[in-house]
Amino acid sequence: MVSVDPERAAGTPEKHRGPVLLRREQVQPGTTDQRLLDSRGPSDWVHTDPWRVLRIQSEFVEGFGQLSELPRAVSVFGSARTPTDHPDYATGRVLGGRLAEAGFAVITGGGPGVMEAANRGAQEAGGLSVGLGIELPFEQSLNQWVDVGINFRYFFARKTMFVKYAQAFIILPGGFGTLDELFESLTLVQTGKVTRFPVILLGARYWAGLITWISDTLLAEGKVAEKDLALITVTDDIEEAVSAVVASAAERDERTSGTARQESVAANPDLP
C-alpha cells in the first residue's frame, strides 16, 4: 500500500472527471459540461483519442445496424484502377450478376473499377449491391450501382464489415489494397477466426506468380503448411467460383442446422 503524506496531499490540486482522478498540472479549469455547452470554448477535444473511440464505436454500430439484415453475401475485391473496357471489368460484371442470381448480395469497397463492375452486375441482375467506402486523401465517392452504401473513416471498421457479413471472398486482379484484403482473409480463415469460407482468386494468369512464390518460398521454408495452400482456389471460370460459394454456403447451413439440432436435443432429451 502506498502511503500519502496528508500535509502534502492537502495542498495538491486535485480534480475528479468521472472515474478519472487528475492532480497537479493535469487539472484543467472548468468542467466537462461547461466545455460541452460553451460554444466559445476550444474545439480541440473533438480530435482527442477518447472522442475518436466514440467515432469508431459509431462506425461499428452503423455498420452492424445497416448490414445485419443482409441476405447471404459475398465480398468481391479488385482494383479500383480497372477501366470499363478492360476484360477484368467484364468479368466482375458477369460475376456480380451470377452471384445475385444465386441469391447472394454483393459487397465491394464501393469504388470504381472492378468494384463498380461487381456492384453493377449485381444491381442489373436484380440483386442487392452493397458498397463500403473509405475516406481517402483523394476524393472517391461510391459508384452509382450501389444500393446500400456506408462510408467509413477507419479501415479496420470497414474490414470487419467485409468479413462479418460475407460467406465467401472472391478476389479479382488488383493492387496493394486487394492484396491486403486477400491476405487478411486467408489469415482469418487459417487461424479459425472465421469459419471455413472459400477464398477464390479469379484470374489464374494474374495470380500465378503469387501462388508460385507461396509454394516455392513460403511452403518450402516452412512458413506455411501444405493444408494452408488448400485454403486458396484459383480459377478463370466464373461458374466454378459461384458453384464453390453455393456449395460452401449449403455446407455451412447444414452444419448450423446440425448444431442447432444437437443443442435442442441436449436441452430437451425427451424430444423425438
Image (tube, grey):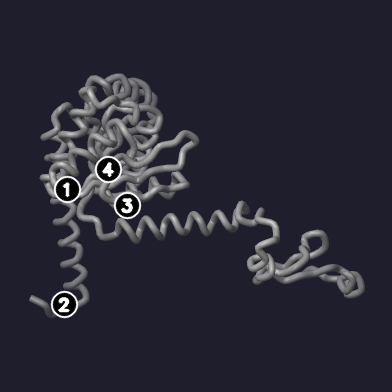
Q: Which residue is drawn at 72% across and 68% down?
A: 21
Callout 4 secondary element: strand
Q: Which of 87 and 171 is in front in this view?
A: 87
Which label number is shown at residue 75?
A: 4
Q: Mark 4 packing: few (<14 Cα in 10 Å), some, or many (20+)?
A: many
Percent from the top left, x then y, of residue 196?
A: 25, 46
Q: Earlier in the sequence, mark 2 or mark 1?
A: 1
Do labels 4 and 3 touch, CB within 8 Å? Answer: no
Q: Is residue 263 left or right of residue 131?
A: left
Q: Earlier in the sequence, mark 4 or mark 1?
A: 4
The Cα atoms of the two marked residues, 3 and 2, are separated by 33 Å
Q: Comparing marks 2 and 1, which lies closer to the viewer?
A: 1
Q: Which of marks 4 and 3 is nearer the N terminus?
A: 4
Q: Name the residue under label 3.
A: 164
Q: Which of 143 and 40 is in front in this view?
A: 40
Which label number is shown at residue 127?
A: 1
> In which image quadrant can residue 71 be found?
bottom left
The Cα atoms of the two marked residues, 1 and 3, are separated by 19 Å
Q: Mark 2 points at which residue?
A: 269
The Cα atoms of the two marked residues, 4 and 1, are separated by 14 Å
Callout 3 secondary element: helix
Q: Vertically, is 197 above or below 229?
A: below
Q: Which of 40 and 189 is in front in this view?
A: 40
Q: Residue at x 33, y 28 (%)?
A: 174
